[in-house]
Amino acid sequence: MTEDKLKVMPKLEDVVDSYHGKIGCMCGCNGKYKYATKHVKFAEKNRGYDLWQDEISDRSVKIIYNKIAKAFASGKNIITSDKPLQNGINYAYVEDLDSGRCKAIYFKI
C-alpha cells in the first residue's frame, strides 16, 4: 500500500470516524478519534469492542470533515491510500505543519 493524493472528496455520510491530534502517531496517543452515530455498529465490529459514549460525536466528525473538505477545495494535498484498508475503509488526512496538527477522516468506499 502506498499513499496518494485524494482525487475525490468522500461524502459526509460515508465517514465512519475522524481524528484530530498532533502530527506523528495516529493510534490515539496524540489525539482523539470520534465516531459517527450512523456507523457505531460497524466501528465496534471493526475495532472488536464497544465504543464509549464520549467517543461518539456527529458534530466532531462533521467539523473535521469540513476542515478537510475546505483544504481539498483550496487545492491542498490531502493524503489517502491507493488501496482500501481493512473492511472497505479508506482514509484521508491533512497535516498543518505550522500548528503541528493532523486531521483525518476514515470513510467507507
Image (cartoon, helix red, strand yellow):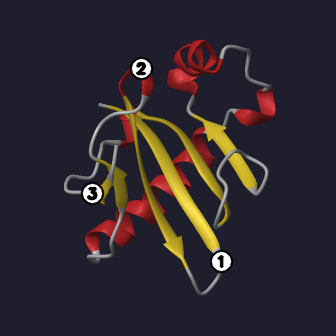
Q: According to the image, label 2 marks what residue?
A: 87
- Which element carries disc 1, helix, strand or loop? loop
List x then y, in percent, for residue 35: 61, 34
Q: Amino acid at mark 1?
A: Gly
Q: At x 67% / y 14%, what residue is drawn?
A: 48
Image quadrant assignment for residue 13: top left
Q: As rendered, which of 89 and 63 lies closer to the eye?
A: 89
Relative to 107, is 28 above or below? below
Q: According to the image, label 3 marks what residue?
A: 6
Q: As rendered, which of 12 and 109 lies closer to the eye?
A: 109
How far apart in space, not on screen, are marks 3 and 1 (Cα)? 21 Å
Query: Between disc 3 and disc 1, whose residue precedes?
Result: 3
Query: Between disc 2 and disc 1, whose residue precedes?
Result: 2
How far apart in space, not on screen, are marks 2 and 1 (Cα)? 30 Å
Residue found at the far front of this picture = 1
All told, the count of numbered labels is 3
Relative to 99, is 2 above or below? above
Q: According to the image, label 1 marks what residue?
A: 100
Q: As rendered, which of 86 and 6 lies closer to the eye?
A: 86
List x then y, in percent, for residue 6: 27, 57
Tags 2 and 1 touching, CB below 8 Å: no
Horizontal side of 103 relative to 24 (left or right) equals left
- Which element carries disc 3, helix, strand or loop? loop
Q: At x 64% / y 51%, what residue is drawn?
A: 26
